[in-house]
Image (spheres, rainbow, N blue to C red):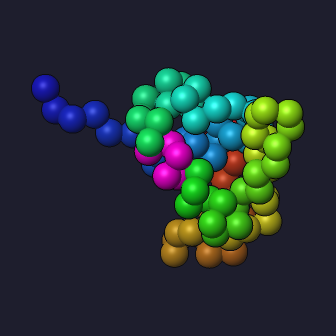
Amino acid sequence: MAARWTFLTNHALVLKTLALHPQITANEISSEIGITERAVRKIIADFHNDGYIIKGKEGRRVRYAINLNMPVQDRTQQGKVVGDLLRAIG
């Protein structure tokens, strides 16, 4: 059986999931999109370190806010921002 491919990267899927569910856990994201929790945490760290998301505490949970005005990191999408990407992928 051939390996399956998808149109969206794991980074795009994690970002979309965070946008839809700002208080979701890494474990829940892992189950939803089918990658390891460790991979999800690495992606979240990438986004946080580069300013694409802001993490804040609400009680015992983390709430994620996405900086919609950050540029999409793809040389073919110059001038596009993360908000454009999220609107496009729903």
User: Hey, which quadrant is residue 29 in on the image?
Assistant: top right
Toward the viewer: 29 or 72? 29
Q: Identify the residue shown where x is 62% and y is 75%.
A: 78
Write down the region rendered in magenta.
Answer: 39-43
Residue at the image point whose x is 54% and y is 29% from the top: 27
Residue 16 can be seen in this image: yes
25 vs 66: above or below: above
Residue furthest to the left in view is 1
Q: Count of labels shown?
A: 0
Q: Is residue 8 visible?
A: no
Left or right position of 11 against 70: left
What is the quadrant of residue 38 in the picture? top left
| Position of residue 75 in the picture relative to residue 88 (left or right) | left
Q: Quadrant of residue 82?
A: bottom right
Decide if residue 87 is on the left or right side of residue 45.
right
Task: Name the residue at 21% across, 35% down.
Answer: 3
Q: Is residue 89 magenta?
A: no
The residue lying toward the viewer, choosing from 55 and 66, is: 55
Q: Position of residue 57 (x, y in %)?
A: 82, 43
Residue at the front extreme, as displayed: 60
Residue 31 image offset from top left, x and y in percent? 50, 24
Question: Picture coordinates of residue 18 (x, y %)?
Answer: 69, 40
Q: Is residue 57 above or below residue 4?
A: below
Residue in view at x 50 percent, y 31 percent? 30
Quadrant location, the N terminus: top left
Q: Nearer the viewer, residue 70 or 27?
A: 27
Q: Residue furthest right?
A: 58
Indicate the position of residue 11 as horizontal and vertical percent values. 52, 50
The quadrant in which the C terminus is found is top right
